Image: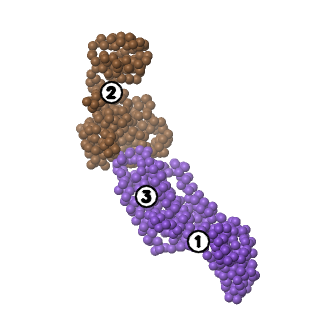
Chain colours: A purple, B brown
Amino acid sequence: MKQLLIFVRKEFYHVFRDRKTLLLLFGLPIVQIVLFGFALTNEIKNSKIVICDYSKDVASQQIIRQIEASNNFEIEKAIWSQSQIESAFEEGNIKMVVVFPANFNNDLQHLHHAQIQVIADASDPNTATSLTNYVSAIIRDYQQEIIGRTSMPLQIIPETRMLYNPTLAGATNFVPGVMALVLMLVSVLMTSVSIVREKEMGTMEVLLVSPINPFLVIISKAVPYLVLSLINLAVILVLSVYLLGMPINGSITLLVAESTLLIFTALSLGLLISTSTNSQEGAMLISLMAMLLPTMMFTGFMFPLENMPMPLQIFANVLPSKWYYIIVKSIMIKGLGFAAIWKETLILFGMTLFLLQVSFRKFKIRLA
Amino acid sequence: MQDVVLNQITKTYNKGAVRAVDEVSFSVDKGELFGLIGPDGAGKTSIFRMLTTLLLADSGMATVNGLDVVKDYKQIRSRVGYMPGKFSLYQDLSVEENLSFFATLFNTSIAENYDLIKPIYVQIEPFKNRRAGKLSGGMKQKLALCCALIHRPNVLFLDEPTTGVDAVSRKEFWEMLAGLKQQGITILVSTPYMDEATLCERIALIQSGKILSIDRPEAIINQYPETLYAIKAAHMSKLLHDLRSNPQVKSCFAFGEYHHVSFQRSDTNQEVQLLKYLQELQHVGLEIKQIQASIEDCFIRLMNKEHAGSRH
């Protein structure tokens, strides 16, 4: 036990004395969150939208004026047919179309409910959500205003349609993706590199010629990176909730528990990589090529998996991050409990056991 | 009692293409300071790794402290001290942190065995808060020795401990080993420096994975059969060529600032005849003296003999 403690302390010394790597490890999630959060979502400025007003009455004019009051859009008024709208989207000139049907005010006054169609180009899901949310908010405000004035139960229903990407895969969902990415990076890359470093520096040779159980070496390597990963997780969650306004609808305890499971999966993968290579460069290359790239590509947060060819969709199943991504989305966005994600959890758990067994079997108690 | 025994140990690499260690047998007595002397690539490190249970031999058997290196590897690992040829401590930990880490690794503490390492540790203690990576070569070796000793091992394996270390530190290091021998620790040390051989009690000369000779250094030197002369002149390379083409000369090889020469016949006349022959060839600044053979002379003679033997 004392051996484990001094080992873990030694690993913390290694981590904290390597300032550059440490800075990278903590800077990375922050940079990624800010990058994905702002650089990729703040495009609503200067977005071109088209308003088709078939009604041209008091109510529609008032709503249009309020939309115009915002400086976020370039607004064009036109009467377009359905096919004109579609071709405009296809050319990529416009981001959103707001359609007021004929007799808008009439419906509102007599039927007490009216509809506005909001069509957005969701191939850029972040922008599409922001735009439709924005317009919906204006419509809601207007509705509140006339209810207050006339005390009649009026209802304006914005019919939102997302073109090209109706499920909005990837919208506010990059946060789970970044979580998967950062946890994989820290755990897989750093563990494998730090174990291989012992081999490269020759210290493994000395450790092997000692009564210590080699597995203790491995376990103590994992502890600091587990801690680091959990800190990173906390940073990401705090940033996404307070900076990006991302919800955590489900249980935060469950989220942390599932994240810890992913960290264990990643640590065992890092261990496996370290048993298969003898140089830090090799470990880094395998980690980057075999882990980070597929995690970016096939987790589903950058490119929707549904749009990929079948072989790639099948390949995505071997990535732990794919399952973790589903888990995190279910907890954070949909607010679901364990009952909804036990299958994915089981898959991650199985992967971890498998990886651990293979790497323990491959672990060498001698050199070469 | 014998603390280290090797019996017909063979180790090959690249699926048998390279015979690094070729049927090597020797044994080291308890409390002995035994030197494995040979150039780079002779197989010294492979032998050390097999004895410290890090590598498995292809054939043959070996015991350390009476324990089989394959079967009882776990017990051996807690009883021996091992200092690899490459500096293998944590460069980013301080001197003291390294030492206390290795102490805990072996379930002991610095305080418990301080008396054993004290003569060595006092020399590096002023720098105990310095990172190991920032120490000089000599101090690194002292720290590595302390770490290898901290659990009071029965057998100490030192693989080329003085390689890359300055002359003064090398001398100090051997004095430390003499001190450790007093404590009754069996020490197996390897070195490519032939001049260090005489500091061991017994040595094995090794070349290309084969043992050339095993004995006390003095005995090996006394076995040198011919009288040896050192000779020098203004033009050393021409001298070497001329000496080699002289039928009088049995062997001749460059050795520092002199060439070492032995004659076919052993009468005293040889020296005078040789000088005359060289003067006729316009050599100037000639100097010749009879010398005592060194371990290196013995090594070269044995190596040439082995080489000639394997060719016929």
Q: Residue A327 bears which disc, if any?
A: none
The quadrant of the image that shows the N terminus of chain B is top left
Q: Residue at x 54, y 70 (%)?
A: A332
**Percent x, y of residue B309:** 26, 30
Q: CA distance from mark 1 to mark 3?
A: 37 Å
- Residues packed near mark 1 inside 10 Å, few (<14), some (14 to 19) or many (20 plus): some
Mark on residue A269? 3
Q: Position of residue A360 (x, y in %)?
A: 37, 56
> Which quadrant holds the C terminus of chain B?
top left
What residue is at 29 percent from the left and 30 percent from the top? B307
SS class, disc 1: loop
Please say if A340 is above or below A303: below
Q: Given the image, on which type of amino acid does mark 2 rest?
A: Ile
Q: Which residue is identified by label 1?
A: A164
Q: Are marks 1 and 2 on the same chain?
A: no
Q: What is the three-letter code of the residue carrying label 1? A: Tyr
Q: Nearer the viewer, mark 3 or mark 2?
A: 2
What residue is pinned by disc 2?
B300
Q: Position of residue A125 (x, y in %)?
A: 60, 68
Q: Are dots 3 and 2 in contact, CB under 8 Å? A: no
Q: In the depicted view, which residue is nearer to us: B143 or B59?
A: B59
Quarter of the figure with residue A361: bottom left
Looking at the image, tell me whether mark 1 or mark 3 is earlier in sequence order: 1
In this rendering, would B177 be left or right of B94? left
Q: Chain of mark 1?
A: A
Residue found at the very far bottom of the displayed protein = A110
The relative height of residue B34 versus residue A312 in the rendered view (above or below) is above
Q: Position of residue A200 (x, y in %)?
A: 43, 46
Circle 2 residues within 10 Å: few <14, some 14–19, many ≥20: few
Badge 3 amino acid: Leu
Dots 1 and 3: beta carbons under 8 Å?
no
Q: Secondary structure at mark 2?
A: helix
